[in-house]
Amino acid sequence: MNELLSLSKVLFGLFVPIAIVFIAGSNIPLPGIDSAFIARQSSGSSDLPERLSLLALGLTPILNAFAIGELGRLLFPKRAGPAIVTGSTAAWTTILVRLIALGIATLQSYSLAVALQTAGAAKPGAWAFVPVVVISMVAATAVLIWLADRVKLPGLRHGLWLLWVAPFFLDFAENLQPSLDQTRTGAMPLLNWLLNAVYICAAAAAVVAVNLHWLKAIGVNGKNPHDQDVDMLSIFVWPIFLASYAGGYLFITLLLLIPSAWLPPQSTTEVIAILTAAALIPIFVFGYARHHLKEMQVSSEKTSAVFSAAAVVAAVQIVLFLLGVFLGRAANLPVSLNGILLIVMTTTFLAIARRERPSKEERLVALTNAG
């Protein structure tokens, strides 16, 4: 009971600052935007004010920059040594990734500002509209980077993924309302709710089981004080994201090279894109497994066990990824949760549960002293 209350306090302490930043940033309009323009355009789009707010870019620049950084970690791994047991990233690479994120934010905000100015969204006489919008949006991205760095989650190095899943919970009630209305009118049968609940519970249970299997394979048991700092959960969140990220760019490149007369129908194209991303998942999973073998200095006797566990991780990610896509297209589910979001969300909450969790020996000492 005490552990549950402690976990609730940790969740509250982590989520509230993130919620404040997202809610405030999503409701503060970009400086220089004409309110009349927002009023005219909002009639056909309920989320337009959010798309014209300080957080209009969201986490896109940060995710793109961090993805580039993760690809660099896999392609150019650090040499094994005592300095990397904690899984920390070198200071210069950390700074470089943040600068890339701010650079991407600058380019994206400039494109948006120019488009808004061309569409007549700027207030009359706002001569510095473009630079002011760029500075504001880059500053908002910097705040999100700072917030992600302040949140330390065991096994994930930073709080980026907590920021990534936060909007789902902030918008949960609003997104659920249409499904409730459809259920009341009979348009959505209760069977859809049951299917949704079974899918979410089974997927979450599978992720938890594979997490525990992976941690056991690499020798993380909570007794080592450094285990809180070891980067051992990236294998769950990054491979499926990087597979979608790289698969998308790879597929677009292939489409550009193929003559238009040979292009398949759109439905076939979508299926090929999904299968391409699924096929790339094992590549990134085993890349992280190889990285962990060096980072954590796992003994050669455990190498086969680590790669076997990685194979299980890859299989579960592929199944959940494809199952989420299939259910999203074949069934009208009340709660839209794709495989990527489910895996990231479950892994993030497991990391939060491990946050500063005492070992069995420490809990025994605490109980003895209390007695």
Image (cartoon, rainbow, N blue to C red):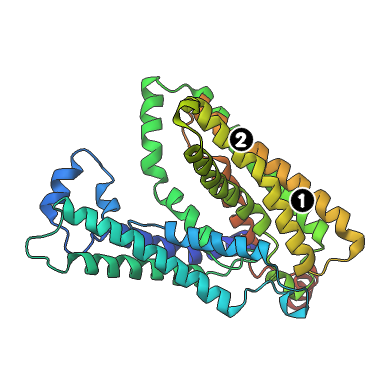
Q: Residue at x 48, y 36 (%)?
A: 335
Q: Nearer the viewer, residue 336 or 297?
A: 297
Residue 175, given in percent of the width and then of the height, sits at 39, 40
Quadrant for residue 110, please give it.
bottom left
The residue type indicated by label 1 comes to Ala
Badge 1: residue crowd in 10 Å (few <14, some 14–19, many ≥20): many
Quadrant containing the N terminus is bottom right
For this orientation, the residue located farthest to the top is: 186
Q: Is residue 138 above or below residue 332?
A: below
Name the residue carrying label 2: 275
* 168 sits to left or right of 227: left
Disc 1 marks which residue? 310
The amino acid pointed to by label 2 is: Leu
Q: Which quarter of the figure is the C terminus placed in?
A: bottom right
Q: State the residue at coordinates (65%, 45%).
A: 280
**Residue 74 drawn at (x, y percent):** 67, 62
Q: Position of residue 180 (x, y in %)?
A: 39, 31
Q: Which label's residue is closer to the chain start, 1 or 2?
A: 2
Q: Is residue 1 visible?
A: no
Q: Secondary structure at mark 2?
A: helix
From the viewer's side, name the closer residue of 268 and 258. Answer: 258
* Residue displayed at 46% across by 55% down: 166
In the rendered image of this protein, does residue 53 appear above or below residue 257? below
The one nearer the camera, 1 or 353, is: 353
Task: Locate residue 291 relative to residue 37 in the image: left or right.
Answer: right
Is label 1 in a helix, a strand or a loop? helix
Vertical comparison of 57 with 311: above or below = below
